[in-house]
Image (cartoon, rainbow, N blue to C red):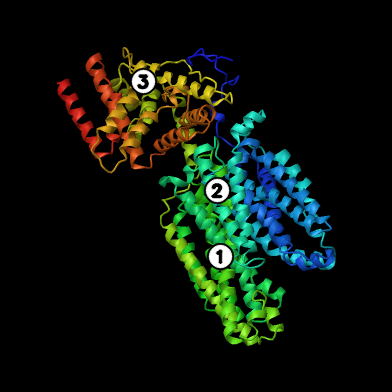
């Protein structure tokens, strides 16, 4: 089908058949707006998803020997446990992006049944291959159970609520993690090992029924109707390279020091392969992907630094958790000669304290909203606890072991859930699933790294000590198993001495890692959680103006438009507002016609065709006049592109060497680019501020992903536009001041040339200018205007 050479109001360009409802853009259902019964049912079902994910990690731990005995398995039985961890770690980071295509509820239910099918295969298995295959499949399903549950809760809560609701998922996770080994041991001894896997099956229909009828999520943001669109919209290469990288890494870490030496060609080859795959993944995301599975700009822009910092911090938090829960029982068995059941029971207080600390921290965060200080306190406590743990030896009492582990539990628990909330803070709803899934995948990777690295340190020191104490037996010992050491002729005192020193080295390393974690988190930007007041402010402002006379509403809206709260509050009384509106803006007129928002463009799947459609739509910026000047009957008023062009030249005129001038020029050129589709919407039209922002965000998404297919150039435009909207960087603040100054400059020129009084544009804009040089320009302009008026 041929395309018109330009996209004008009567364009025949392929579009959706109906305009997009403005107030339906990016507005998920909220817990506050649903009944208590529905809220409880949703939380219970999502909590059960978290329970299934967590218990699957540990329920097999105490039964591996039993399974191996029953099935006469002679191969590497560790893969019965590690296979589930392998696929959950590899697939968790990508589920967030897949929800954009399939939808959150549909994908969660799909993942649930993949998880159930995997357990059926494993539970009915009669060989190691079938058992591992079932565990690998259940891991693919498990990858989405926790992540998507967190994504759904994040969608349905504002930032202050979020920590408390997510903490419910976290507590369920901790409880399941703790009771998993006990349930596994009970099934193995009292029933059959197959019930380790069949145990999960009844939960599937129950959860499915609740979620199907009770949970209502937004439709997917990226609809796909053909295989051609799937190839364009889904970042298949990015997913493949990321999964490959994580798979190779986890396999290398599990084989190293066990099946193969760390310096073996197999382990080195796997690690090199993981690194190469990750490099390819980065290249694909930056240069190739249309809709990147992990948008690189979320991790490379300084104003978004909380996301990468929290990925590192959360990885290291679980580095500590897994290392502690794995090696403290080994220490108690080797040094204190306690039974495995008692060793496992003594780690439970650590987990309980972590859950209590998490609950208290999230309650405080939800009440006050200042979350960064709470997180930093947890990072101070954690290295202290790990340092105390390193002082334990054979003379330490059980009470001291438990007491020190409680301190570690406070440090870990206080930071575990709010780290996810910090990462989510300020992230647009469009990227919230991606960030949530990626940050939620950090625990598995942290666990693998923690157990592996601390294990190498502890085993290395144990080996070194025993080689000194019993050199004649050194070559025949299994240093990973304290019980085999004593049965091989090593005295219990020598084993206790060696493991005490190894344990000290391991936990000193953990203390150092915790201190490093504290240092990098000092760079977190300030965070104040929203309590839903932003939405309420918009609603209240609509109520305030609902019954006001027309002339009052116009001035009130103009004040809001130009970000001047002072004018807003000074003009709230009816008399003052009416007087101000009449005197300040005698020529003000407004259109009573409701603006019609054209349907959004639908991608044809062709790069060239969609790119040209974008080039054509830019013509509207040249021909569309700015609404404010039309309302004041300015003859031949400036267009949107006229405004942006002068701003770009103004940016080049600054002498501020601290600014990135090139970025400022580009930002000035794109800051109003969304108006090519939605037009120059003014606040006195029938759109709330939230509607306007959502509609412009939708337009940018349409340009970047449907027309320009997420190319690097398109993502640069999107990043510049979002940076301007967020107003956090010096460049964004400077360009906003140029926007205000250019408005005042143009108003002054129209006063001069058209004999108009346009102080209603000057008064709200000039006082808001903060940049010293632009403020000086504005001062010169106002002095010139004053001389002219005399």
Say if residue 338 shows up in the picture.
no
Residue at 54% across, 65% down: 410
Per the image, label 1 sits on a secondary structure element best described as helix
Residue corresponding to mark 2: 161
Place of residue 675 in the rendered image (x, y in percent of width and height, measured from the top left): 43, 24
State how far apart marks 1 and 3 are (Cα).
Answer: 58 Å
Residue corresponding to mark 1: 320
Q: Nearer the viewer, residue 471 or 462?
A: 471
State how far apart marks 1 and 2 are (Cα).
Answer: 27 Å
Disc with the residue nearer the chain's start (1 vs 2)? 2
Instruction: Determine whether, in the image, residue 528 is placed left or right of residue 437.
Output: left
Disc with the residue nearer the chain's start (2 vs 3)? 2
Q: Disc 2, disc 3: CB below 8 Å?
A: no
- Quadrant the N terminus occupies: top right
Instruction: Say above or below: 704 vs 326.
Output: above
Residue at 71% across, 57% down: 56
Q: Nearer the viewer, residue 239 or 724?
A: 239
**Callout 3 environment at 10 Å: few (<14), some (14 to 19), or many (20+)?**
some
Disc with the residue nearer the chain's start (1 vs 3)? 1
**Callout 2 environment at 10 Å: few (<14), some (14 to 19), or many (20+)?**
many
Instruction: Determine whether, in the image, residue 255 is placed left or right of residue 503.
Output: right
**Callout 1 environment at 10 Å: few (<14), some (14 to 19), or many (20+)?**
many
Per the image, label 3 sits on a secondary structure element best described as helix
Say if residue 754 shows up in the picture.
yes
State how far apart marks 2 and 3 are (Cα).
Answer: 40 Å
Per the image, label 2 sits on a secondary structure element best described as helix
Closer to us: mark 1 or mark 3?
1
Residue 226 image label: none
Q: Nearer the viewer, residue 275 or 587?
A: 275
Looking at the image, the residue that sits furthest to the front is 265
Residue corresponding to mark 3: 628
Place of residue 512 in the rendered image (x, y in percent of width and height, measured from the top left): 47, 68
């Amino acid at each position: 089908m041929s395309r018109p050479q330009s996209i004008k109001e009567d364009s025949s360009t392929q579009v959706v058949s109906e305009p997009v409802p403005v107030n339906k853009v990016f507005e998920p259902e909220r817990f506050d707006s649903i009944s208590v019964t529905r809220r409880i049912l949703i939380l219970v079902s999502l909590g059960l998803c978290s329970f299934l994910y967590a218990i699957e990690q540990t329920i097999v731990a105490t039964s591996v020997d039993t399974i191996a005995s029953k099935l006469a398995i002679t191969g590497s039985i560790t893969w019965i446990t590690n296979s589930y961890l392998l696929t959950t770690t590899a697939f968790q980071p990508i589920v967030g992006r897949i929800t954009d295509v399939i939808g959150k509820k549909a994908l969660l239910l799909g993942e649930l049944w993949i998880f159930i099918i995997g357990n059926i295969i494993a539970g009915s298995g009669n060989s190691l291959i079938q058992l591992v295959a079932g565990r690998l499949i259940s891991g693919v399903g498990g990858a989405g159970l926790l992540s998507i549950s967190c994504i759904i809760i994040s969608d349905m809560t504002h930032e202050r609520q979020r920590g408390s609701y997510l903490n419910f998922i976290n507590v369920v996770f901790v409880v399941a993690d703790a009771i998993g080994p006990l349930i596994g041991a009970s099934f193995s001894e009292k029933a059959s090992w197959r019930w380790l896997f069949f145990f999960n099956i009844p939960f599937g229909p129950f959860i499915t029924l609740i979620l199907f009828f009770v949970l209502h999520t937004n439709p997917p943001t990226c609809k796909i109707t053909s295989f051609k669109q799937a190839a364009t919209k889904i970042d298949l290469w990015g997913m493949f390279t990321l999964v490959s990288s994580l798979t190779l890494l986890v396999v290398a870490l599990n084989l190293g020091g066990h099946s193969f030496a760390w310096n073996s060609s197999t382990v080195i080859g796997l690690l090199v392969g993981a690194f190469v795959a990750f490099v390819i993944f980065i290249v694909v995301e930056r240069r190739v992907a249309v809709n990147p599975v992990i948008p690189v700009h979320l991790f490379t822009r300084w104003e978004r630094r909380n996301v990468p910092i929290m990925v590192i911090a959360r990885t290291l938090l679980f580095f500590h958790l897994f290392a502690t829960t794995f090696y403290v029982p080994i220490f108690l068995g080797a040094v204190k000669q306690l039974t495995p059941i008692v060793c496992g029971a003594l780690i439970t207080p650590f987990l309980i304290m972590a859950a209590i600390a998490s609950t208290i921290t999230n309650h405080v965060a939800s009440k006050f909203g200042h979350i960064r200080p709470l997180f930093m306190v947890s990072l101070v406590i954690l290295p202290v606890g790990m340092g105390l743990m390193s002082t334990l030896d054979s003379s330490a009492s059980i009470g001291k072991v438990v007491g020190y582990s409680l301190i570690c539990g406070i440090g870990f628990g206080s930071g575990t859930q709010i780290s996810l909330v910090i990462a989510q803070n300020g992230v647009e709803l469009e990227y919230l699933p991606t960030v949530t899934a990626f940050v939620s995948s950090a625990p598995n990777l942290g666990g693998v790294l923690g157990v592996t690295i601390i294990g190498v340190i502890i085993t290395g020191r144990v080996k070194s000590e025993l080689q000194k104490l019993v050199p004649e037996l050194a070559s025949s010992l299994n240093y990973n198993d304290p019980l085999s050491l004593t049965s091989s002729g090593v005295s219990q005192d020598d084993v206790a001495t060696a493991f005490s020193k190894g344990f000290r080295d391991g936990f000193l390393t953990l203390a150092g890692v915790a201190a490093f974690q504290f240092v990098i988190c000092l760079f977190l930007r300030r965070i104040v959680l929203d309590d839903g007041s932003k939405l309420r402010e918009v609603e209240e402002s609509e109520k305030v103006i609902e019954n006001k006379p027309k002339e009052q509403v116009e001035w009130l809206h103009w004040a809001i438009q130009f970000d001047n709260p002072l004018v807003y509050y000074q003009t709230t009384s009816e008399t003052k507002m009416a007087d101000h509106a009449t005197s300040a803006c005698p020529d003000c007129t407004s259109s009573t016609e409701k603006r019609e928002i054209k349907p959004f463009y639908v991608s044809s799947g062709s790069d060239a065709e969609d790119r040209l459609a974008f080039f054509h739509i830019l013509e509207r910026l040249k021909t569309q006049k700015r609404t404010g000047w039309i309302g004041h009957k300015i003859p031949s008023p400036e267009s949107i592109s006229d405004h942006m062009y002068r701003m770009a030249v103004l940016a080049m005129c600054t002498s501020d060497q601290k600014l990135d001038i090139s970025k400022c020029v580009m930002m000035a050129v794109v800051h109003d680019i969304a108006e090519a589709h939605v037009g120059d919407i003014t606040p006195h039209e029938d759109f709330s501020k939230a509607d306007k922002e959502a509609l412009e965000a939708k337009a940018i998404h349409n340009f970047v992903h449907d027309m320009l297919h997420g190319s690097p150039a398109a993502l640069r435009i999107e990043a510049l536009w979002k940076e301007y909207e967020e107003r956090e960087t010096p460049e964004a603040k400077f360009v906003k001041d140029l926007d205000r100054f250019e408005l005042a400059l143009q108003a002054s020129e129209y006063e001069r040339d058209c004999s108009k009084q346009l102080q209603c544009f000057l008064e709200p804009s000039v006082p808001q200018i903060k940049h010293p040089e632009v403020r000086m320009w504005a001062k010169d302009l106002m002095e010139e205007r004053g001389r002219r008026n005399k």
